[in-house]
Image (spheres, coloured by chain):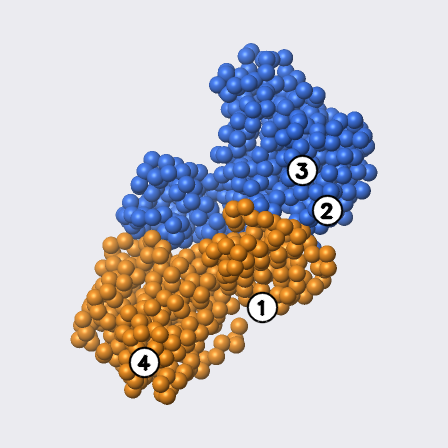
Chain colours: A blue, B orange
Amino acid sequence: MTDVPLDFVPVPGVRLSTTAAGIKRWERDDLTLIELAPGGTAAAVFTRNAFCAAPVTLARHHLIRTAPRYLLINAGNANAGTGAQGLRDALACCEALAGVTGCATEQVLPFSTGVIGEPLPVVRIIDALPRALAGLSEQGWADAARAIMTTDTVPKLVSRRFVADGHSATVTGIAKGAGMICPDMATLLAYLATDLAVSPEALQAILGRAVAPSFNAVTVDGDTSTNDACVLLASGAAPLAPVTKLDSRVGQALAQTVSEVCRDLASAIVRDGEGATKLVSIDVVGARDCEEARRVAYTIAHSPLVKTALFASDPNWGRILAAVGRSGIENLDIDRVTIHLDDLCIVRDGGRAPDYTERAGGQVLARKEFAIRVGLGRGEVAARVLTCDLSYDYVRINAEYRT
Amino acid sequence: MTDVPLDFVPVPGVRLSTTAAGIKRWERDDLTLIELAPGGTAAAVFTRNAFCAAPVTLARHHLIRTAPRYLLINAGNANAGTGAQGLRDALACCEALAGVTGCATEQVLPFSTGVIGEPLPVVRIIDALPRALAGLSEQGWADAARAIMTTDTVPKLVSRRFVADGHSATVTGIAKGAGMICPDMATLLAYLATDLAVSPEALQAILGRAVAPSFNAVTVDGDTSTNDACVLLASGAAPLAPVTKLDSRVGQALAQTVSEVCRDLASAIVRDGEGATKLVSIDVVGARDCEEARRVAYTIAHSPLVKTALFASDPNWGRILAAVGRSGIENLDIDRVTIHLDDLCIVRDGGRAPDYTERAGGQVLARKEFAIRVGLGRGEVAARVLTCDLSYDYVRINAEYRT
């Protein structure tokens, strides 16, 4: 769990700082400020949970009106399920930051993560703003990756350099999340930035494409958060013409790099899933359409029986088979279904493969990373979902979360 | 967990026996035989899992052709995921019993429950048949309730007498199941019998109506089994005219009693859910239609975060709210949503109820049985799902199941 590199490349035009606002009774930095240079652009995707948090509502509203100068992120309190007071509290934080910096209130995007339903400690956040502003630095990415954590055990930080039109450019991103992970159009909190100049429309398109196979294809526990948000900033500090089209050479290079950073951050989130001891890729092939491929993959990924068997390194493949069978695929021909653990075939012709042995199955499941591969034998479409196992520690972490 | 009564009223015309066939390496009765008097009728509902077990396929096939004389049930091996050999094995058991008793092979219905994917020990089952036949008795219900158990910790047996046309009649039933519980048109294994004479059509209608709000409205872990089956037998031993219509006085009394027995058996299954320490009713009201009411109820009932909070007696209601929000109800007006724990209001007007206290919430969750009541405020339809909490023991039981 300690193989996540904390090396990173700073992004010119983007500065970060962290400070201890005392959101909860703890001794750690819990308030993160990200500053985008004037003239930069931003794109974002948010949770589809109907009970979305107050900061999600407000950030969405602000982003429609103008490009942001500041992202203000607190850990320890989700400001969700807080009704009208929650909106007033989120707005008060934005107004206070605008007052100190001279930007417009709409140029501040608020984000919160933590316990749902507690009032946001607005005064403590506002009191911390001068310290946060004083600490801004292009070197702040690693501290920010740590300060946005809640039940995460490792910070998630990914950095990539790429060459665009002969110049070197950068995409650096951080993310947090370990539980309530089944993102729907976004993940918990993720912040990426590039030093290229990019039009808002191109930036949103790049982010949308990157999120689908990364953050939107991972699950820890099937619980979609109220606070999911993923933001991509473009500072324009690099000496290159603005990207306005995805099919330009620079646009393609940027889109590719953003996708890679999102994919790496998303797999880091599953690897650090609450109580997780294994990273498991559920690969479904031979589906008629994307929806049924994803449905089968998610049914396996959410099955408590499959997840406890993964934890036990028990090749109890009957549970995988039962999950495929109950996933609601119409007219599934079970004689065409195949199930592999990595390259080991365990099910074909409607039953256990004759050459399969429990010992070989146990060897695959003892690995820290492996794939469950399901062939439906009814089409050409594939889908992949990343997930983890269900361990004693998942129960412990979530039974003790608020104590 | 020891409050399940093992008193019962025998059903004239129905005899049972149990014997130790040695399906697994254990010292216990694991083979159950149920005999129905000649002229009796039967109705059944089965799992909708596409990977249904060989005995389910065969029992369905036999039941279409004729009324059964024998139900042959083994615990310890599901005979599921066993392909063509599984079907041959199930048929061999039916043929052997037919050979010894002189009935037709189609008059034997096979049932299996246990580990998926292992070959059925056919020879051991056939060797045990003479002992099983010799032991048949109308007094065998309690032993049968024990012999069909797998990870169950208590037998489930419910018996009801009722008065029909001035005569006393009986419905007695047994069920098993503790994990892989999310029945879809049936539950794991349940066998009910009455001494009334009932036409096959009326019997099927009575069972269908009884199953919907009982076995089809409970969930332990969301995993629908490959082997679910629920059978209702009518022996005709009572000195009453056959029931052919549900709207007759006797038909109504029988339907009512069968529904009650199914409801009691279904709640006994959840109460004995793997690792369960609490029985929780999820009551959704104010829905536009039954589908959305059930969808919200099941989303809450399947949320690992809600279930671990229930285990911890932690009134972390934000998790309930997040589950409602992600259940996929279009245009949900969150300001109209209410959430109660029993009679305690925790959410209204889109946030925490002003008069709610954590202490009061914790008091409700400390109960062994309580209700989570969700009002959607958009219609008149209600649904109820029974579920249990997610504890360390659920992980232990399912991580160690095959060891």
Q: Which mark identifies residue A390?
A: none
On the image, the x and y values in percent for residue B275 come to 53, 63
Q: Chain of mark 4?
A: B
On the image, the x and y values in percent for residue A87 come to 70, 42
Nearer the N terminus, badge 3 or badge 2?
3
Horizontal relation, residue B390 to residue A85: left or right: left
Q: Residue at x 53, y 72 (%)?
A: B1
Name the amino acid type tagged 4.
Answer: Leu
What is the quadrant of residue B175 in the picture? bottom left
Report whether mark 1 lies on the same chain as mark 3: no
Mark 2: give few (<14), some (14-19) or many (20+) Cα within 10 Å.
Answer: some
Report which residue position mark 3 lands on: A58
Report which residue position mark 2 lands on: A85
Residue depth check, mark 1 versus mark 3: number of the one nearer the observer: 3
> CA–CA distance between discs 4 and 2?
63 Å
Horizontal relation, residue A103 to residue B130: left or right: right
Helix or strand or loop: what does disc 3 sit on? helix
Report whether mark 1 lies on the same chain as mark 2: no
